[in-house]
Image: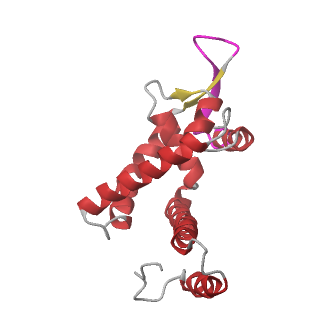
Amino acid sequence: SHVNYFVMATSFDSYIRRIDYFSTLHPDSPKTEIVLNRLFLHVSKLFNDSQNNHLSPYGLNNTSWGTLIMIYSTEDNALNPCELSHAVVSSRTNMTRLSDELVQKGWIERRHSSEDRRRVVLSLTGEGRKLIESILSSQWAYLRELWSTFEPQELAQLEALLTKLLLHLDAAKPEGTT
């Protein structure tokens, strides 16, 4: 049986009621694992929606912010699109669309790599750097508030557990996938 942390009503209650019923039909089902899987996806969607709401006044969403931050966090503020799509866990097709949008807004530019002129890199413009730096303190406050429900040791434990799950999932990926 699953641990019921939901003393107050949550947006997950509907799922819990149904999985409780499902478990009566299939008592041998891995109920805890089913709940954890769905809970992880549910929380991830709520987190993404919350982040998008926070960033929307700046003309950004979670993916565009992550893209800008990955470029900003690279020593020369430039990344090739393939590395960038891997860093933000986005398809190359979506990265092309997103890059087009960020170029159009004047926050990044495409240029040829200084090491290999056949390669294109995406680099921050001065406007892109200004945008990021104008948002950082608001983003930090948002993240601190979002995670304030946890004690520091709980945050460390959650990070360790998610990293353990990530390592397991990475090891289970078929070769050649990202």
Q: Nearer the viewer, residue 164 or 147?
A: 164
Q: Is residue 123 above or below residue 173?
A: above
Report x, y in % for residue 81.
64, 31
Numbered-mark total? 0
Q: Measuring from the top left, give residue 72's x and y in whole percent.
A: 46, 35
Q: Is residue 110 above or below residue 140?
A: above
* Residue nearest the observer in this picture, 97 or 159: 159
Q: Quadrant of residue 101?
A: top right
Q: Would residue 53 be seen by someone viewing this image from the given angle?
A: yes
| Residue 161 screen position, x and y as percent | 39, 55
Is 71 rendered above or below residue 62? above
Quadrant of the drawing holding the C terminus = top right
Task: Name the colouring of the figure.
Answer: secondary structure
Q: Which residues are magenta?
A: 103-118
Q: Residue at x 48, y 80 (%)?
A: 1
- Was residue 51 drawn as part of the magenta stretch in this picture? no
Q: Residue furthest front?
A: 28
Q: At 65% from the left edge and 83% from the top edge, which residue is drawn?
A: 22
Residue shown at the point (62%, 42%) measured from the top left: 173
Where residue 66 appears, x then y in whole percent?
Answer: 53, 46
Up/down of 113 relative to 23, above or below = above
Is 157 situated left or right of 79 in this image?
left
Residue at image x 63%, y 85%? 18
Is residue 25 rendered to the left or right of residue 140?
right
* Res. 88 in view: no
Residue 112 is one of the magenta-drawn residues: yes
